[in-house]
Image (cartoon, rainbow, N blue to C red):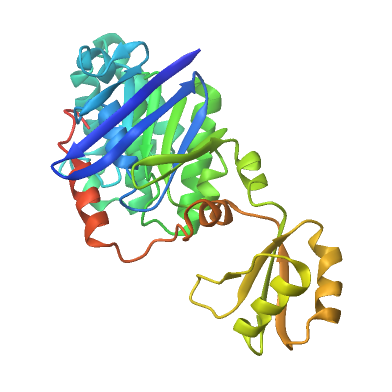
């Protein structure tokens, strides 16, 4: 059963089309990932689904409720963790959760128990009476997860949930997220540009410049790459690329990770490398072999990598417009 239904969604900001004819469904209990770079349309889509922005065209339903005609019912069905911190840092952890529970009409008889349960779940119960301003970035993220679940939502939206955190803290946050999903059975809608986070999703929608360019499981998306990835550096990469294309009939791509070199896709790469080394006349300096990653998928689909980089003016406009207003209580 689909808990999120999106049909031909469009969002325009004057001459800029931030979301362009986007359609997809998310099943109940699924972890669904939106993968794309800054300015791709991820946050704009989430803001529409959370009723923070109105679409220009198209339809969307969350938990059976229309995001335009039934916004209050949508909001009561969801939890949301923003890219940027949205806690009241002048309040304690417990006061933040109490305030949120009150806004969402959590019954008084159940409020104290839910707050205690949520704080223990994210291992912050011992810090319940401490001001949030004294919390680390990871602690604030954990508290935001607890806050987003206090009213028992059907769908938890995570918009770049570990942005700016160190790898160890990011890993710990994901332990909580996966535990919450298993324990509560909630649907999780995730946006990210971190490849390791996207691997946690059951399905991934790859979005670029407002359009979904692929949607499938992580493994099936990797199959789009067409084989193993061989990367190599040679004495003359331009000459080597021509030689490989002529001798082996393979398409060769330049590296886009600030290193010189080439990469190519081949089936059974471990068998191809000895042949490449023996037949290539241009001297090889270094060669490596690996299975495709989601970064390779994005590069295959869009011609560029999905790393965090300086944004173009167009992307900056997309990101600024996507932020929209903040939801009451979040």
Q: Residue at x 66, y 78 (%)?
A: 242
Residue 306 screen position, x and y as percent: 45, 57
- In this rendering, position of residue 212 left or right of residue 133: right
| 299 lies above or below 208 | below
Pick the quarter of the image with the C terminus. top left
- In this rendering, position of residue 257 left or right of residue 6: right
Of 232 and 165, nearer the camera is 232
Of 326 and 254, nearer the camera is 254
| 247 lies above or below 151 | below
- In this rendering, position of residue 1 left or right of residue 84: right
Residue 75 screen position, x and y as percent: 26, 20
- In this rendering, position of residue 116 left or right of residue 95: right
Residue 177 screen position, x and y as percent: 48, 36
| 318 lies above or below 9 | below
Q: Can residue 81 be seen by looking at this rendering? A: no
The quadrant holding residue 152 is top left
Q: How many marks?
A: 0
Q: Residue at x 86, y 74 (%)?
A: 274
Q: Residue at x 60, y 41 (%)?
A: 218
| 266 lies above or below 328 | below
Q: Can residue 61 be seen by looking at this rendering? A: yes
Residue 307 screen position, x and y as percent: 44, 61
Q: Residue at x 47, y 16 (%)?
A: 2
């Amino acid at each position: 059963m689909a808990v999120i239904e999106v049909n031909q969604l469009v969002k325009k900001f004057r001459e800029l089309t931030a979301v362009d004819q986007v359609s997809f469904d998310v099943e109940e209990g699924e972890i669904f990932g939106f993968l794309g770079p800054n300015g791709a349309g991820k946050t704009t889509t989430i803001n529409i689904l959370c009723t923070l922005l109105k679409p220009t065209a198209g339809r969307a339903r969350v938990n059976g409720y229309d995001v335009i005609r039934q916004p209050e019912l949508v909001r009561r069905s969801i939890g949301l963790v923003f890219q940027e911190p949205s806690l009241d840092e002048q309040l304690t952890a417990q006061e933040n959760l109490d305030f949120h529970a009150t806004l969402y009409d959590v019954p008084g008889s159940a409020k104290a128990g839910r707050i205690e349960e949520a704080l223990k779940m994210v291992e912050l119960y011992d810090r319940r009476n401490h001001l949030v301003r004294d919390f680390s970035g990871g602690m604030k993220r954990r508290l935001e997860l607890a806050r987003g679940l206090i009213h028992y939502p059907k769908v938890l939206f995570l918009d770049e949930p570990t942005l700016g955190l160190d790898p160890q803290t990011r890993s710990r946050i994901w332990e909580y997220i996966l535990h919450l999903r298993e324990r509560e059975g909630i649907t999780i809608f995730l946006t990210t540009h971190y490849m390791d986070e996207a691997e946690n999703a059951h399905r991934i929608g790859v979005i670029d410049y407002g359009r979904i360019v692929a949607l499938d499981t992580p493994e099936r998306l990797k199959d789009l790459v067409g084989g193993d990835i061989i990367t190599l550096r040679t004495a003359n990469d331009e000459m080597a690329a021509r030689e490989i294309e002529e001798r082996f009939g393979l398409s060769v791509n330049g590296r886009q990770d600030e290193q010189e070199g080439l990469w190519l896709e081949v089936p059974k790469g471990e068998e191809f490398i000895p042949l490449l080394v023996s037949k290539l006349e241009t001297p090889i300096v270094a060669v490596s072999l690996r299975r495709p990653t989601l970064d390779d998928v994005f590069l295959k689909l869009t011609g560029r990598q999905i790393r965090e980089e300086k944004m173009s003016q167009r992307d900056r406009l997309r990101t600024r417009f996507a932020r929209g207003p903040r939801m009451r209580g979040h």
